[in-house]
Image (cartoon, rainbow, N blue to C red):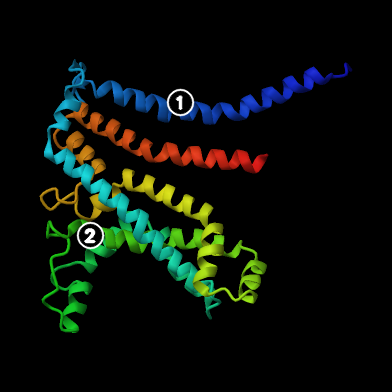
Amino acid sequence: MPIKGPRDHRAQKALTYTLFLALPVTFFLTAYVYAVGYTGFVSLHSWDGISPTMRFVGLDNYGSLMGQSRFWHAVANNLKWLAFYLVAPSTLGLALALLVDGKLKGEGVIKTLIFLPYIITPVAVAAVWRWLYLPDGGLVNTVLDGIGLSGVASNWLGDRHIASYSVMAAALWSTTGFSFLVFFSGLRSIPAELFEAARIDGASAFTIFRRITIPHLWPSTVLVLGLFGIEAMRLFDLVWSMTGGGPSRASEVLATQLYDVAFATFQMGKASAIGIVQLCLAAVLILPYIAYITRNVEEAAE
């Protein structure tokens, strides 16, 4: 039997790596690169999604979007969601993590109750909150009436001025568990000796939080803010399931507008243009995040 040399072993290892990478690379090329490329191609055409031919219109679809107040309203709503995700569930998750980390009784039950909403599908979350927000007989208005605040009761999903914020309340309930879990894990990874040494030196609770907790939670913060930022730009299911982008398109975001333009008016070219713009906006958030994570991984490896 011939003895394999180092070159044969390297070739066999390279073949093994290639075979393992073949499936994910193929999936990435077909499900992402091809999909994005074809979407960009369709965005340059006028097409109803059914006809066998497309009419080339160049950048007219993009120009049409830029001149529509509806499009800019959806962009503004996505930016509102971005601000919401970066502040509300992140801050609340951190506050709950600090509270539970204070060695509360029943810690396991509390952690489960906080994290449980996060594993519920957005469509189920929407169904629950639609019931809570019912103008007649909904739990929110019933409670407000019971405590003498009937003047505050409202048609939470039917009022164009508050519909988006009502959906945000549902999102806060369902997403806080994620940030809580990440921050809680980060807190438990901080060496206890640092806190003990700070207390011995007479540091106040605020000083300990500012000088020890916050710096050590920075990796967790980057993770939470990065993923929430991406979620804000791709948001669809919760808004569509609760309001359909209404009333009067008041709560519409880019993804719901894309769906409506594509499947209600069959303007596939314009819908594809919305998708490309949405992708570019998301890339503005994603690329710095990826660059930061990559740099930190490389530094850790060195």
Question: Residue 184 in the image: x percent, y percent?
Answer: 52, 64
> CA–CA distance between discs 1 and 2?
38 Å
Dot 2 amino acid type: Tyr
Q: Nearer the viewer, mark 1 or mark 2?
A: 2
Q: State how many labels appear.
A: 2
Q: In the depicted view, which residue is nearer to us: 155 or 96?
A: 96
From the viewer's perspective, is 185 left or right of 255? Answer: right
Question: Residue 138 in the image: x percent, y percent?
Answer: 19, 71
In which quadrant of the rendered image does the C terminus lie? top right
Residue name at image x 55 percent, y 69 percent: 208
Q: In the depicted view, which residue is nearer to us: 27 or 183?
A: 183
Q: In the depicted view, which residue is nearer to us: 256 or 81?
A: 81
Q: Residues within 10 Å of mark 2 (few under 14, many from 20)?
A: some
Residue name at image x 13 percent, y 71 percent: 136
Q: Is residue 48 visible?
A: no
Label number found at residue 106: none
Q: Is residue 243 visible?
A: yes
Question: Residue 157 in the image: x percent, y percent?
Answer: 17, 60
From the viewer's perspective, is 34 left or right of 73? Answer: right
| Mark 1 residue element | helix
Q: In the depicted view, which residue is nearer to us: 62 or 122?
A: 62
Residue name at image x 19 percent, y 29 percent: 270
| Residue 7 figure quarter | top right
Dot 1 amino acid type: Leu
Label number found at residue 165: 2
Q: Badge 1 is on which residue?
A: 29
Q: Residues within 10 Å of mark 1 (few under 14, many from 20)?
A: few
Residue name at image x 59 percent, y 65 percent: 188
In which quadrant of the rendered image does the N terminus lie? top right
